[in-house]
Image (spheres, rainbow, N blue to C red):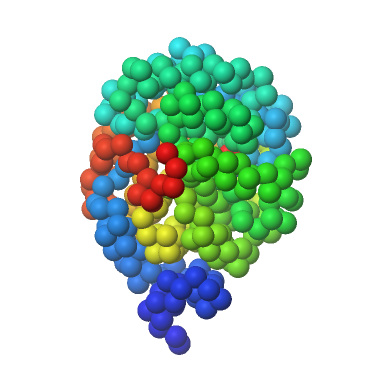
């Protein structure tokens, strides 16, 4: 048998050989992958330290015009009660994030056609005026002009997941959307000086280990500030309702290999990873295997259930002691909560 070390040495070379090594490492059973996780943890601590960066997420609209096959917010889901926060409600939620000492807020929504997006510019400038806070937006594909307006208003970062780097698979799962446009949006965002984040879903119908290896190669070329990798969780009101959930351990392997390959990218231990098993919060395992970010939820309680991209999100039951819970997670992972701004560790071309 070829030793794991051989494959690990090879993943550093982003060429055909590295590619086959990545696929082999992904295929290795979890129980036999200890060396991979030890190594990814070392790489994480070397390039990102022992801190866990915190980003408070506020989900401000659950309306969406798209029909992504995996997502519970798909426009065809008529059972979902939709909501849209007012400017004041968003700012109140941001205040709650700020009171914990967290210095990044992520404002996320569906692609809400009827949202007055200029209002978001106002919210962004108000946040910058009132709080010592970095702003990440995650509002899907929009016009370059709008991205530019938000940047001018003070937005710092943007999160737009490629979901899969396999164009054909992307097209199957996103009717009416275009893979090329998504890539173009990411390029525009970088050009405008945003710290750009992306990511993929693991366990999508039709996705192979080769696709996941290709996702990691894609990340190595694109120099993203942050990469979110989460398992697919089936939603009963989506096109993929009859599909089985993604493998959380394969997801953690993909996080570990992305850490080894991309070194200093911010990698969240995603909420989906924390939600996929009821008995165990697998974010802790991810934090021990290369992840260095957590995104606690600050959406007003009455709306959390309504932003149901997948069922049984763990944030629904965390109660008021979210910070205590995060501290205990950090301790279990042998890390500490980091309340710094958490800017990109990549050299920025613009901005
Ligand atoms: N409209 C925004 C935000 C989408 S929701 C955008 O398009 O960027 C945020 C992320 O949730 C998505 O990018 C997707 O990766 C993830 N997601 C949605 N449904 C999911 C599901 N059923 N299982 C796992 N992840 C899912």
Q: In this rendering, does residue 8 appear at all?
A: yes
What residue is at 37 percent from the left and 79 percent from the top?
5
Quarter of the figure with residue 178:
top right
243 over 294 or under it: above or below: below
The percent coordinates of residue 9 (x first, y second) are 39, 77
Find the residue positioned furthest to the right: 176
What residue is at 45 percent from the left and 87 percent from the top?
1
The percent coordinates of residue 247 (x first, y second) are 53, 57
Q: In this rendering, does residue 315 appear at all?
A: no
User: If the image is split into quadrants, where does the C terminus sit?
Assistant: top left
Q: Is residue 229 left or right of residue 75?
A: left
The percent coordinates of residue 275 (x first, y second) are 47, 43
219 over 176 or under it: above or below: below
Query: 49 and 70: which one is in front?
Result: 49
Q: Ligand 1 is located in which of the four quadrants? A: top right
The percent coordinates of residue 52 (x first, y second) are 30, 45
148 over 5 or under it: above or below: above
What residue is at 62 percent from the left and 48 percent from the top?
183
């Amino acid at each position: 048998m070829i030793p794991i070390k051989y494959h690990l040495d090879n993943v550093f070379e982003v060429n055909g050989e590295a590619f086959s090594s990545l696929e082999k490492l992904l295929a290795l059973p979890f129980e036999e992958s200890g060396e991979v996780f030890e190594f990814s943890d070392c790489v994480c601590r070397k390039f990102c330290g022992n801190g866990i960066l915190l980003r408070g997420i506020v989900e401000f609209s659950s309306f969406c015009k798209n029909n992504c096959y995996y997502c519970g917010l798909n426009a065809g889901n008529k059972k979902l009660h939709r909501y849209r926060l007012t400017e004041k409600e968003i700012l109140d939620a941001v205040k709650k994030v700020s009171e914990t000492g967290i210095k990044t807020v992520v404002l996320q929504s569906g692609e809400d056609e009827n949202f007055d997006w200029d209002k978001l510019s106002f919210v962004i400038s108000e946040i910058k005026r009132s709080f010592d806070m970095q702003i990440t937006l995650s509002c899907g594909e929009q016009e370059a002009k709008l991205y530019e307006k938000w940047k001018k208003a003070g937005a710092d970062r943007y999160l737009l997941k490629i979901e899969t780097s396999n164009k054909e698979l992307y097209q199957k799962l996103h009717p009416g959307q275009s893979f090329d446009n998504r890539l173009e949006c990411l390029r525009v965002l970088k050009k405008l000086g945003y710290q750009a984040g992306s990511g993929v879903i693991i366990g999508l119908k039709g996705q192979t280990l080769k696709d996941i290896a290709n996702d990691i190669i894609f990340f190595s070329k694109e120099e993203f500030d942050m990469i979110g990798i989460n398992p697919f969780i089936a939603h009963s009101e989506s096109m993929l309702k009859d599909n089985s959930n993604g493998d959380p351990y394969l997801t953690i392997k993909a996080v570990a290999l992305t850490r080894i390959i991309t070194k200093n990218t911010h990698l969240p231990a995603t909420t989906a990873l924390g939600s996929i098993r009821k008995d165990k919060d697998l974010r802790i395992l991810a934090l021990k295997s290369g992840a260095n970010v957590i995104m606690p939820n600050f959406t007003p309680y009455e709306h959390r259930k309504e932003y149901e991209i997948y069922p049984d999100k763990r944030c629904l039951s965390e109660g008021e002691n979210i910070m205590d819970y995060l501290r205990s997670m950090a301790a279990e992972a042998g890390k500490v909560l980091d309340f710094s701004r958490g800017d990109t560790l990549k050299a920025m071309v613009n901005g």
